[in-house]
Amino acid sequence: MNGLITRIEPNSLAEDIELEVGDKILQVNGQTPTDIIDLSFQLAEEEIEMLVEHEDGEREIICFEKDVDEELGAEFETAVFDGVRRCKNGCVFCFVDMIAPNMRNTLSVKDDDYRLSFLFGNFITLTNMTAADFRRVKNFHLSPLFVSVHTMNPELRAKMLRTPKAANIAENLDELERAEIEYHTQVVLCAGLNDGTELDYTIEEIFKRRPHALSLAIVPVGVTKHRRDKFPLKQFDKNSATKVIEQVEKFQRQSRNETGETFVYLGDEFYLLAEKNLPPTEFYDGFPQIENGIGMTRNFIDEFNAAEISGTEKFSVDVISGTSFAKVLGNLVGDNPNVRLVPVVNNFFGERVNVSGLLTGGDIIAALEKIGGSRDVILIPSTALKSGEEIFLDDVTVDEIREKFAPAKVIAIHDGEEFKRAISQLNTTTARKNSRPTYPTF
């Protein structure tokens, strides 16, 4: 068990009872919390007896009283104290299985944990849940969850996920619905596998599950050059992406006519591949799956256009981007002579991987060296960095880029307003306004 505290909020209950960074919470009122969900329910009592292990190994029982709704005010190393539930599937499209060898261990962790689904929106297949897990979801009403459906055809789903349990998707969703649990869904679309008439069937079946089903996202499969699986996977191109858009549009029109909401959304990359205009903002219904790449580009453009920023300083700016998003940025930048777009080819994962969120520090350095010249500012997408740290997937750090191209400033951009502010040079050190990056992965 690991209830390790990594931060204490100032003037919080945790500070009042003298908890410190490095302490571990072992028990609350005689119960051992397995995750922060347990902990929140256990701390709902007014009288608390907490067993704590300090950094030096000494244990202490801390007794205190609190208001029922008073929060502890501590952050933990991980949200799950008993370890992340690992995925036992062998999905033919699993991206974790396509990463380069010898990358840091955390990148090879395949989680399928319903707790992370509830807390952070991680997608789960439901195949790795036990009967006790389903009971806990019901008892604690952990809603909404985020479910990777991929297909509602039982045999095809078992084939794609390589586990017979995957065929039980309808029964699994039924069980959630009986417990009044809502859920968002996604399909990783593979050309020639779960598209075409199979996709029609999946959408129709998820439509029937409204209102428990809150949304359906369809994202294209990604394949890196490091994939070793022999199962044939075909990616989408301009023509096939166009067909998917046209196919899904009929369901989107149907849903808007029936409910006023689009409900089924396509990943941004379909529109970029097909060179089609993105849907309008209202089409995304508040962006329920923005962190799944659904509407990130539209949201970024909206933020850019809404920002009332102007600058007079003339600095040269290099803008780093994946090759698929470069055209969008080019339209926003226009003919600004001080801004140079740098679309980076992904040699690390393979040229077909063209999203900004999977750019590596090594490829960025190579691209900047290739174009040469001088620059005062280098803008990089925050989605390419490890959460909370300035480090890329290949373990190159932002500081290494700073040293390489000094005295240029290197700034991670999180959203459209920050991008506009940075290229306008009004203030290139502005901190992000919120914790959720909206810079598209594309």
Image: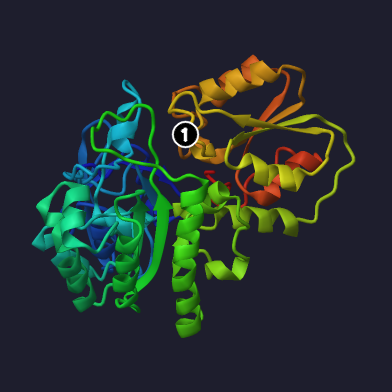
Q: Which residue is at a point 27% across and 54% down the rendered structure image?
A: 124
Q: Is 281 on the left or on the right of 357, as rendered?
A: right
Q: Position of residue 27 (x, y in %)?
A: 18, 52
Kindly identify which residue carries mark 1: 352
The answer to whether residue 335 is above or below residue 130 is above
Whether residue 328 sits left or right of residue 437 in the image: it is right
Left or right of residue 186: residue 325:
right
x and y, in percent, of residue 13 in the image: 39, 56
Q: Is mark 1 on a helix, strand or loop?
A: loop
Spot the residue most to the bottom.
Answer: 258
Residue 413 rendering spot, x and y as whole percentages? 63, 41
Name the quarter where the N terminus is drawn: top left
Q: What residue type is labelled 1?
A: Arg
The image quadrant where one finds the C terminus is: top right
The reply to whether residue 94 is visible in this rendering is yes
| Label 1 packing within 10 angstroms: few (<14), some (14-19), many (20+) | some
| x and y, in percent, of residue 122 in the image | 34, 53
Q: Could you tell me which residue is drawn at 21 percent across and 66 percent down?
A: 137
Please name whichever residue, 100 or 58, is drawn nearer the observer in this view of the structure.
100
The structure residue drawn at horizontal position 19% and vertical position 78%, both measured from the top left corner, is: 178
Q: Which of 113 and 265 is in front in this view?
A: 265
Q: In which quarter of the image is residue 23?
A: top left
